[in-house]
Image (cartoon, rainbow, N blue to C red):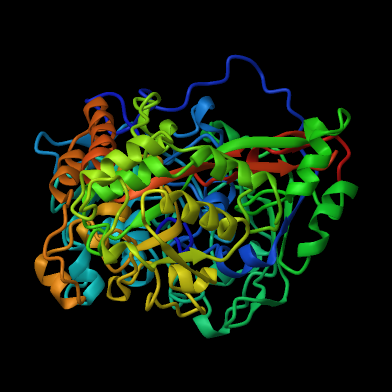
Amino acid sequence: MQRRSVAVTVALLVASACTSGAEEPASPSQADTTPSGGTLRIAVEDFSAAVNFDVDPQRGYTNATFALGRCCLFRTLYSYNGRPTEEGGTELHPDLAAGKPRVSSDGLTWTFRIAPALRYAPPFEDSTITSRDLVRALERTARVGGYAFYYEVIRGFGDYASGEADSIVGLETPDDRTLVVRLEQVTGDLAYLFSLPATSPIPEGAADGHDKDYARFLVASGPYMVEGSEALDPSAPPRQQEPLAGYVPPNITRALAVEEPGMLTLVRNPSWEPRTDRLRPAYADRIEITLGGADADIARQVNTGAADLSFTNHGAPFNQVARYEEDPGLEDRVKRNARDLISAVTMNLAAPPFDDVHVRRAVGLAIDKEAQVALLAGPPHDAFSWSWAEVATHIAPDGLQDRLLGAFDPYPFDPGAARAEMAASAYDRDGDGRCDAAACRGVRALVLDEGVAPKQARAIRGDLAEVGIQLTLDPVSVGDFFGFTDLGGTFAGSINDPRARIPIGISVGWQQDYPEGGGWFQGLFDGAALEVSNTALVGASPAQLEEWGYTVTTVPGVDDRLRVCLERRGGSRTQCWAELDQYLMTEVVPWVPIMIGETAVVVSERVVAYSFDQFSQRPALDRIALAPGSD
């Protein structure tokens, strides 16, 4: 689970914060013969429609926001090509930017140049995107943003957010095409932060009075706009403005159920010019997205062509994928891709017996991860369940660390080695490789009661019994496990609540916000993420531990190591993240990584080209093409 409610990588040249090594994406070597046109029809399951769908670029902190922003609605200073990792999908490219940023020798001042003559969708088709529009976006992010914490590194950002200042002093616009950003501390991944939708430009007057409902009045800068955008009247008082006709949000109950489905319809932005945007081919003329209301019917809709694919985190239902892959005439319609999504057993470093590193290493060696992955092949196969994965051997996916740790596997399944580690712990008094202390009896394990996770938890209970750890499984709903129970949300009693003093959790999921180590490790193990997403309590202070009711007084931390990596750029930064991964796995051991997820999407027979967007972990809607004549 990333910092976006349910689940949270890599530069190469020291001279640049970008990995592309070019002023702009290279032109294709030959003409693109992929057919364009037609209406792409997308179905969204109830769960995704309820908790993962928000097109507001500053407020929306979901996969869907990131996916729709990158592919369709918003351009940012830097962005991605909408392809999987092996096709350069995690490489950062200039988008609105005219090239690489210029970074001062002390790393505290970044200067960005904006490409000329880029315009907005109607009704701002006569407005050129300027540096001031980016400042306006960051100011709105400071006021309302779902992930404003990323930009607190900008000088004065926090003062503006708290109302103590009327501007962000670290943002300067010497002219319409230049943005200067001054930082409080060295941050090597600033260009990545300017790839997130929160930084997408806002024309003057467009969002005035719409801090809470800009999604219904937003102005696009990408190849698509919401249908009816030309009818917006930003000159009218905000309460008198008519919202976009093409976006009707689903009606969601406080229990996160879809009472009435919604609809989002995207049409071509007449201001967008393909020659100025080499990242998005935008094949379809129109994209119709149904938001919820058809969970049981989505597979049938794709089978018949009423929908072209399901646009969710979890892909197509297991049984549908299995049937298609067994049929030579249908197997080409299954699209598989590795996701930057990990599932792990998390251990509380302050809760006995997991306050002993030897116990934590024993747990890592005792769990049969191959068997864990094999359980995915059996029922239940519901929409939330993981259905496809490969064994994880360390914390960050290989693709986000330039595969530097491809052969690193410190905890292969080895019951003998697990008993040896337990024998070295303070909890094995007779040295027989089995914990004989009271702390190992009746150990509460909070279990995510979704899909196959309870079966995996029972298997882990059996594995750990071999080293004397007796788990008491406590299955809870996804809301109670992660800490959100309604639209307001709470962490009380969840795996993210240190006061709950939960010893072990099965299992935590996490995925990146942006494909760089800073977007992966900070939310998991930074001391600033305690009480939010640092489930293992890595870096908790003695005072915090006392406040939360622990008898353990110290736990290991990695804040200093994180700071070192965050200040670097280029290849040394990538190496730093890999070394941090190794250190966490061998010396801290907060997690037992279990598996890296895969997604399998079934597409309709109308789809003739498909791509997976590694950045957003969703299908790249701008790269899906339909057979000629598809209305």
Nearer-the-camera pick, 354 or 147: 354
State which quadrant residue 171 falls in: bottom left
Question: Could you tell me if residue 464 is visible in this image?
Answer: yes
Q: Position of residue 140 (x, y in %)?
A: 36, 67
Question: Could you tell me if residue 520 is visible in this image?
Answer: no
Residue pictured at 46% horizontal, 80% vertical = 488
Q: Position of residue 175 (x, y in %)?
A: 27, 47
Task: State whether residue 545 is above or below residue 385.
Answer: below
Q: Position of residue 540 (x, y in %)?
A: 17, 62
Nearer-the-camera pick, 213 or 234: 213
Nearer-the-camera pick, 446 or 494: 446
Residue pictured at 33% horizontal, 64% vertical = 503
Q: Position of residue 499 (x, y in %)?
A: 28, 76
Residue pictured at 18% horizontal, 70% vertical = 159
- Asked whether, in this view, residue 25 is left or right of residue 359, the answer is right
Residue pictured at 54% horizontal, 71% vertical = 477
> In the rendered image, which quarter contains the N terminus?
bottom left
- Asked whether, in this view, residue 277 is left or right of residue 496, the answer is right
State which quadrant residue 395 falls in: top left
Task: State whether residue 293 is above or below residue 566.
Answer: below
